[in-house]
Image (cartoon, helix red, strand yellow):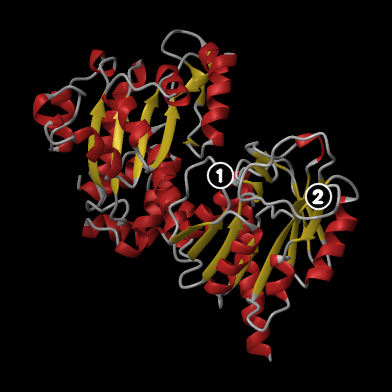
Amino acid sequence: MNKISQLISLLGGTGAVAEMLKIQPSTISNWKKLNKIPSTKHTAVLELSSQLDVNIENFLPTKKLYNFKFKILLIISGGIASYKSLEIIRLLKKTDVELDVVITKSAQKFITPLLVTSLNEKKCYIDLFSVDDEAKMNHIKLARSPDIILVAPATANIMAKLANGLADDLASTILLASFSKIILAPSMNPVMWNNLATRENYTKLLDRGIEFINPDTGDMACGESGTGRLPEPKSIINYVFSYFHENRILASQLKNISILITAGPTVEEIDPVRFVSNKSSGKQGFEIASELTRRGAKVTLISGPVNIPFPNCENVIQVNTAQEMLDNVNRQLPTDILICSAAVADWKFIPKNNTNNRINTHNKIKKTDGRLLFEALKNPDILETVSKSNLRPKIVIGFSAETNNIKKNAYSKLKSKNADLIIANDVSNNKVFGEDFNKVILVDKNNYEEWKKQSKKSVAYHLANKIHNLLINYNQRDIDA
């Protein structure tokens, strides 16, 4: 019996295959006679074999699963499911991916470095303190070179290390030193997966932008049943490539679009040691800058004083005062989009004595028994100034921090500042400043759109989608005009 006849037999016979593929039985008979399936039908047969759990690798010509060219670092941590990582390697070898593999000491209790090296056809890495490797600072190279770091299986232990900043072996050091996208595929006992400590670590890692391929439910090697099984290797591979495909599309979504973002607080000095400012951390603006950069935009970030790392965008300008921020915004115009997320101090305060004369502020103001008065001078309104100028960007987005009447005040700001979109939030009782989560309301000329509470990273992601749609509508209006 030839190979195609064997395959048709495994799939249920000529009549069954013809019915499932909705083609004539004579066509199937012809395939068997020629010992060949037309390339146009390979995908349909692959899908059919997948549904029927039939392995057809020996029947159809070898074919790359995916043609994306990028780098993956696979970290195999200890656990009974480590053996499944060998199938992940085998599947990745059918793609154009450049693959490196790191095995933890615990994983070596289940699989050997020699086996991994044989499958991947290149050295695998096992030791942080290898003289040969670390002479080249190899843990940094491994951390920085991949597009994606996939940890499969990811044990409760390696999740805890990553969540709490521990770096006591090669795998955990790489994870902490990397700028790459990290995807974890957890595998552990169901009680461990549902343990409060693991759930807290899971939430913490999600908030930091780590992706998870959540475990499957079923019988475990330990004899218990529940959620904790490592997903099947094909599912893991499909997730990774779907993620990469989506991000490859997103990376060009805002290509050649220039975006100017203000973020953080501004500071108005009273004297050399005192100042007026606010509680803004800059986190939301920085997340927006990161997300829009990821989408291919040319992002310039103008930031007041903050205590968080700057995002990896095209240009970062640091300022202190409201006037400095406005001056630098004007220098960056024209731009396609302006996003004013900075919490700009509304006033600067001029100290005066009890006879209403200005006090010299070149030196520290000394305490006296006399009254100290302050004259409040209004700072420039950056959003309104730019939005009503001749160099107004195509799209202008402002933020509105409110303590009451959120929608009403946000809509009033939208109209008075001539903005296209206002993102409003409730900052009463310090609900937002410095936090990693935000709950916002989007206000435009026609609608209110209330978003559920989510991480500031997630807000940035959905705002980027909104901006993309606004650009499409804007460009369509230009065409119609």
- Please name whichever residue, 32 or 178, is drawn nearer the observer in this view of the structure: 178
Q: Quadrant of the N terminus?
A: top left
Mark 1 lies on a secondary structure that is loop
Q: Is residue 259 visible?
A: yes
- Please name whichever residue, 280 or 131, is drawn nearer the observer in this view of the structure: 280
Residue 363 image offset from top left, x and y in percent: 61, 46
- Between tags 1 and 2, which lies in front? 2
Label 1 crowd bin: few (<14), some (14–19), many (20+), radius 10 Å = some
Q: Is 406 left, or right, of 177 in this rendering?
A: right
Q: Quadrant of the C terminus?
A: bottom right
Q: Separation of disc 1 and disc 2 at Cα?
A: 26 Å
- Judged from this view, the residue extending furthest toward the bottom is 481
Mark 2 lies on a secondary structure that is strand
Label 2 crowd bin: few (<14), some (14–19), many (20+), radius 10 Å = some
Question: Could you tell me which residue is drawn at 29 percent across and 14 percent down?
Answer: 106
Which of the labelled discs sits on residue 306, or is there none?
Answer: 1
Question: Could you tell me which residue is drawn at 47 percent across and 25 percent down?
Answer: 163
Q: Label 2 amino acid?
A: Phe
Residue 32 image offset from top left, x and y in percent: 27, 55
**In the image, is residue 103 above or below residue 366?**
above
- Please name whichever residue, 19 or 68, is drawn nearer the observer in this view of the structure: 68
Labels 1 and 2 touching (C-beta < 8 A): no
Quarter of the image where one finds residue 161: top left
Which of the labelled discs sits on residue 374, or is there none?
Answer: 2
